[in-house]
Amino acid sequence: MHIQKPRLLTPGPTPLYPKALQAMMGAEIHHRTQDFRDLYLSVLADLKVVLGTAHDVLILASSGTGAMEAAVTNCFSPGDRVIVCSAGKFGERWVELAQAYGLDVLTLSAPYGSVVEPATLAQALAANPDVKGVFVQASESSTGAAHDVRAMGKIAQATPALFVVDAITGIGTMPLAIDPWGLDFVIGGSQKAFMLPPGLAFLSISPKAWERMDAARLPRYYFDLRREKKNAAKGESSWTPATSLILGLAEVLKYLKTLGMDQLIDNAQQLAAATRAACGALGLELFAPGSPSGAVTAIQAPPGLSSSVIVKEFRQKFGSIIADGQGEMKGRIFRIGHLGYFDIVDLFALVAELELILNANGVPVKLGTGVAAVQTHYASHTAGKKQPVAV
Amino acid sequence: MHIQKPRLLTPGPTPLYPKALQAMMGAEIHHRTQDFRDLYLSVLADLKVVLGTAHDVLILASSGTGAMEAAVTNCFSPGDRVIVCSAGKFGERWVELAQAYGLDVLTLSAPYGSVVEPATLAQALAANPDVKGVFVQASESSTGAAHDVRAMGKIAQATPALFVVDAITGIGTMPLAIDPWGLDFVIGGSQKAFMLPPGLAFLSISPKAWERMDAARLPRYYFDLRREKKNAAKGESSWTPATSLILGLAEVLKYLKTLGMDQLIDNAQQLAAATRAACGALGLELFAPGSPSGAVTAIQAPPGLSSSVIVKEFRQKFGSIIADGQGEMKGRIFRIGHLGYFDIVDLFALVAELELILNANGVPVKLGTGVAAVQTHYASHTAGKKQPVAV
């Protein structure tokens, strides 16, 4: 038992789609050529198809946080009052970002593991009719909880506030009907369900958001979306694009169009449900049982055992990389990703590893019982379904 | 459950070592340059270290069968009497090859699933003192059985016969003390424990074999080992080498030197033992229980279920490629590889898949019991061992 394969099982970066990696090798190209413009136009068009929106979709050479910043700086002015629905580390990032640009932030906080309820948002909007924007995470990957962005979008839609959704781990793991639900910004990143290395951010922008840009007085340059839109129409990016990642993205989008976005989402949700079933069989407690995300499952470390030990043993014994809790949740929870290029076979193995780690650390479980829960979930949810899509 | 990752789990081709694949991208080089000569010399030197032999080691741009042919054509003359110890499809290949070149073949056959016993070879050699060569498979991967090449080598060593070992799936899965055991030819291939795509064959050649070459009258040109040896001393190959595979091999050899050949062998043998434990737990019969190979485990299909169905369901349901029986064993046995870049995590998942396939095809097993057998084997064989080597 001496060979160990590295396996990436975190909620981001996620396992890479092999054909995308291969395509990235073709990056000895120049981006100011007609060939690249044609590629960029087709990638933008495919991205719209995959996201299922008629809104404009743009690509930025940045991490997801860059697109979060773009949503702030392009549509708001100093002193604007905004609401942040914060249920974890990424909610706190919205607060920091808005405050860094001098916005007047009203934070609706939910305890870690819970989410901000739509009714709470409705009350806050009613009490603060001057609010210009509402910021939220679709999936809060630090806690494994998912917001009800459908209900929240409907509420914000009836007000002047823009509804800005960090869907970096939400895209491809939960339904997101961008246009009907009133999602003014929907933000994604390459290293999540898009199965690529980090380096690209995406965002969709509603007509309501575009209307606000000319009057918005926050400074912006690299993330100027009006300029980016004008260039994108010609197949150009404002600044040098991350060409290798665009080549990879073209392959991923081809795959996702074949697979179907609904199947990608169902894949993540079934893996998440099977993971929860395994936790139940092994007597482990979920961290966000009330509103579990399809992107990531956060599991509480058993009493007396640090999640940091569990994470370390996954790596040392099996070469598997899972995620510890972030900040004050470090040592208390461990997190397993489901978004993007994961399959049920990954989960069979991961749960077998977890069982051995628990047993070796004084948390006795009967070997195979968690795996059997995953197998049972698989068997009962694939009967009569169409065949999986292989690469 | 709709994403499906392709997984190669056969006894060859085997899973590829990722850093080797990456290195193969550097193949825009010329082979008649000092840089390549230096690389080739270091690869040949490392290969000797890894094989643990003082004999000459050469590399051929061919499949393993090419090196088998080289062993025949370089040391024998038309009408030479030779013994083939045949215990499966690859034993039969020795017979075909020797007969194609006009050798007088005495075949010692063992039924599929069994092996030729050393005593049988000793008797045949005693009865036929004119025998010039003995041909055998170290591991007969068509049946999952391993010959006792140590004992057979000792027997042949005391006679004029050359002892020619097809170790294509034997290298890296069983101890092979080439020099002391009197193994005159030991033949390997890149797509087995060497974790590379097919295209390279290796062979070690003893002084006893070299002595026979000048008098050998079979025709040879591409596989002329004397010419190859002369060129190899200068870092050259006689004909154009498969440069990308040589670059990949350099990475693999670096990895194997770090891992240790003994650990590579133990890895395969423990995986094979854990697979047999899982079969026991699931009530499945082994095809070669008496002399099981560490390279591959051949498992009998349960009564009433074709192994071809099992193989097909592995692929269709999970994207996993395992091997059916060959020739008349097709439909009767299925084969799982352990040689090279396999780890225990692969096996956790594979056995979980197998359990689901058995259940879905009228062979009821309790889910998780085979996995638990693998987990138990792992837990009891890793206590106190040194850490695995990650890439």
Image (cartoon, coloured by chain):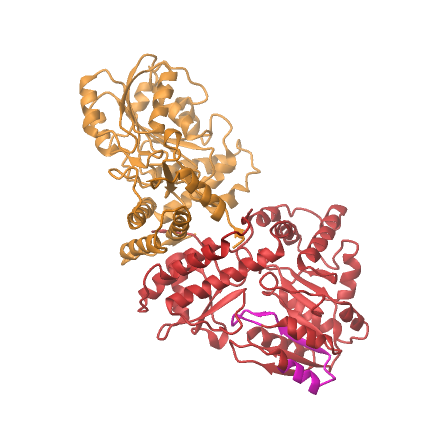
Chain colours: A orange, B red
Against B312, residue A377 (above or below) is: above
Q: Assess whether residue B328 is covered by the magenta stretch.
A: no
Q: Position of residue A96 (x, y in %)?
A: 37, 20
Q: Assess whether residue B137 is covered by the magenta stretch.
A: yes
Nearer-the-camera pick, A341 or B389 = B389
The number of numbered badges drawn on the structure is: 0
Nearer-the-camera pick, A38 or A189 = A189
Q: Where is residue A130 in the image (x, y as percent from the top left)?
A: 23, 15
Q: Position of residue A336 (x, y in %)?
A: 38, 42
Against B277, residue B304 (above or below) is: below
Furthest residue in direction top, as rendered: A79
Which segment is the magenta one?
B120-146
Is residue B316 shown left or right of residue B336? left
To which quarter of the image does residue A229 belong? top left
Nearer-the-camera pick, B201 or B238 = B201
Furthest residue in direction bottom, as rendered: B127
Is residue A388 shown left or right of residue B293? left
Q: Residue at x 31, y 67 (%)?
A: B364
Nearer-the-camera pick, B65 or A22 = B65
Q: Residue at x 50, y 54 (%)?
A: B382
Is residue B282 shown left or right of residue A241? left
Q: Which residue is drawn at 51% across and 60% down?
A: B270
Q: Residue at x 39, y 39 (%)?
A: A307
In this view of the protein, can residue A195 be seen by the observer?
no
In this view of the protein, can residue B318 be seen by the observer?
yes
Q: Position of residue B284 (x, y in %)?
A: 40, 70
